[in-house]
Image (cartoon, rainbow, N blue to C red):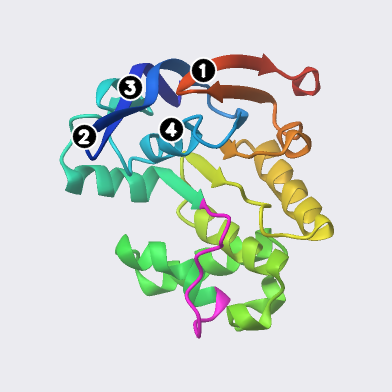
Amino acid sequence: MILELEDVTKSYATGDVLVAALRGVTFGVDEGEFVAIMGESGSGKTTLLGILGCLDRPTTGSYKLVGEEMTYLSESHRARLRGARIGFIFQAYNLLPRTTAAQNVELPLVYAGVPARERKRRVLEALAAVGLAERIDHQPNQLSGGQQQRVAIARALVTTPSVLLADEPTGNLDSRSAEEVLELLAQIHARGSTIVMVTHSSEVAQRASRILRFADGLLVGDELLAAAG
């Protein structure tokens, strides 16, 4: 399994009150799966995504990424593994303004110390893969919302991560752009990538091969979709 959680809990102190965001969550994700995570606000899905992305740690329990226990690693070690193994796609794109598409996509490679010539090759390849080979010199304000999300997806793919984590990737898009982004994610999945996507939309979730449903910090449903095969 590429992701493994066992009896994971996460609690936060809010003033004098201890809030249980996750309450004993256990599941795994196999390599090549496309998993949608659904739940109402406060169900724990955002907290879960933070743990899966190594941005947060469980209070108790075990989280393994590609077979390696992540819970007790140092922050610097976790950061290195996060950069190498996880690609993030955000609802708000998180692109740098006044910076070209190519420069935005290149950033993770700069942080990873990849040589300049190799960076250029991989950036061009990633932007071509999302259909933006002709937009490499455009800044975010020169791109539509759908194109900006495509740049964000290219940035997530450029490090060839083990898993893509998508947080409401169509949340800021009109229906046509959302459909284009979902089709792109389907193509990426078809090429063998593992995707975990948080969404509030049942229609969007149906594009995945499996749906995990959360309520009150608990995993309450695990559905393998018929379309998955």
For this rendering, which residue is in front, 224 or 92? 92
- Label 4 to label 3, Cα distance in Å? 10 Å
Instruction: State which quadrant residue 60 falls in.
Output: top left
Residue 101, image x, y percentages: 57, 75
Is residue 70 among what the camera can see? no
- Label 4 to label 2, Cα distance in Å? 23 Å
Amino acid on which disc 4 is placed:
Leu
Q: Earlier in the sequence, mark 3 or mark 2?
A: 3
Which residue is under mark 2? 16
Residue at the image position 51 percent from the left and 29 percent from the top: 43
Which residue is under mark 3? 9
Residue range in magenta is 89-101
Q: Earlier in the sequence, mark 4 or mark 2?
A: 2
Alpha-carbon neighbours of circle 2 within 10 Å: few (<14), some, or many (≥20)?
A: few
Amino acid on which disc 3 is placed:
Thr
Looking at the image, residue 45 sits to the left or right of residue 201; the answer is left
Looking at the image, residue 41 sits to the left or right of residue 147; the answer is left
Label 1: which secondary element = strand
| Magenta span contains residue 170 | no
Amino acid on which disc 1 is placed:
Leu
Q: Which mark is residue 219?
A: 1
Q: Earlier in the sequence, mark 1 or mark 4?
A: 4
Residue at the image position 67 percent from the left and 16 percent from the top: 223
- Label 1 to label 2, Cα distance in Å? 27 Å
Alpha-carbon neighbours of circle 1 within 10 Å: few (<14), some, or many (≥20)?
A: many
Alpha-carbon neighbours of circle 3 within 10 Å: few (<14), some, or many (≥20)?
A: many
Q: Earlier in the sequence, mark 3 or mark 1?
A: 3
Q: Nearer the viewer, mark 3 or mark 2?
A: 2
Q: Earlier in the sequence, mark 1 or mark 2?
A: 2
The answer to whether marks 1 and 2 mark residues whose Cβ atoms lie closer than 8 Å is no
